[in-house]
Image (cartoon, rainbow, N blue to C red):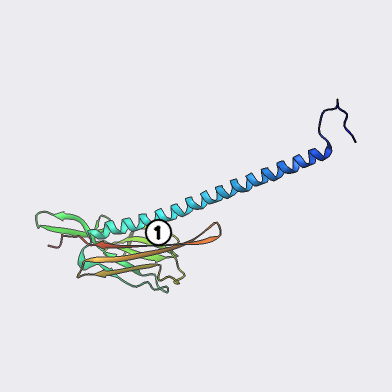
Amino acid sequence: MTRNENQAGFTLLELVIGMTLATVIMGSVFVVQKTSTDSFGSAVSEHRNTQFLRGGIKQIKMELRSARDSSIETLPYDPGMVDPVLEFQNAVGFDIANGSAKWGGGGVQDATIQYMVVNGNLERWVVDDQGQTIQQEVLVQNLDMSLKNGPPVDFSWDPVKRVVDLTIRTSNTVEGRPVSRAVSSVVHVESVYSF
């Protein structure tokens, strides 16, 4: 079909080429936008997991700083047991009349703070002197239970230097790929309440 000089419009071939180009461009824009959205979601998820891990370390450090030296006990992680890997008491009050500290955990006199691995999470328990659980909370989720990088938690107490070395390892899957984190810290036990 030939076009007369006074006819306006596009030929069928021009329309097909134009629509094909528009489809390719729109597809490319969609792929770029989806990749950006997925990357942002991944970054947010990784950031959230890192914040939980750091928050857990921060709480442990805060409580350990005021721990009673003689009450600190660390045990190696044993995958077959649900035992505390870290246990201690910290100052919960002072007896001014006798010039001594009152020891306990979680604000409860004579209680003990215990950190243990339960179902792939690091949990914080406060247990009274009768062995009854008063408080229980998940502190860090998604511990790395594979043991290929070491135990999921590692606490060691040096009473001479008065420091606790701690390492917590987590592992997640974000957007189909494994993401592992390990945070280590050295906590100086500053309790000066040993009268």
Is residue 135 visible in the rendered structure shown here?
no
- Residue 167, percent from left and from top: 35, 65
Which residue lies at the image location 48% right of the left edge and 52% below the top edge?
A: 43
Above or below — where is 2 with respect to 70? above
Report helix, strand or loop for mark 1.
Answer: strand
> Residue 136: which quarter of the image?
bottom left
Instruction: Using the rendered view, name the quadrant where residue 169 is placed.
Output: bottom left
Q: Residue at x 26, y 60 (%)?
A: 64
Would residue 22 be visible to someone looking at this image? yes
> Residue 87, position in %: x, y?
29, 66
Indicate the quadrant containing the N terminus: top left, top right, bottom left or bottom right: top right
123 or 3, nearer to the observer: 3
- Left/right placement of residue 82 relative to residue 1 reads left
Q: How many marks?
A: 1
The amino acid type of the residue labelled 1 equals Val
Query: Where does the C terminus fall, quadrant-wise?
Result: bottom left
Relative horizontal placement of residue 22, taking residue 163 as reference (left or right): right
**Residue pointed to by mark 1:** 140
Query: Residue most toward the top?
Result: 6
Dot 1: within a 10 Å radius of its alpha carbon, few (fewer than 14), some, or many (20 or more) residues?
A: many
Q: Is residue 27 above or below residue 106?
A: above
> Which residue occupies 45% across, 72% down?
148
Figure quadrant of residue 54: bottom left
* Between 4 and 100, the one nearer to me in the picture: 4
Where in the figure is residue 105, as x and y percent of width and height? 26, 59
The image shows residue 60 at horizontal and vertical percentages of: 31, 59
Asked whether 30 or 12 is in front, the reply is 12
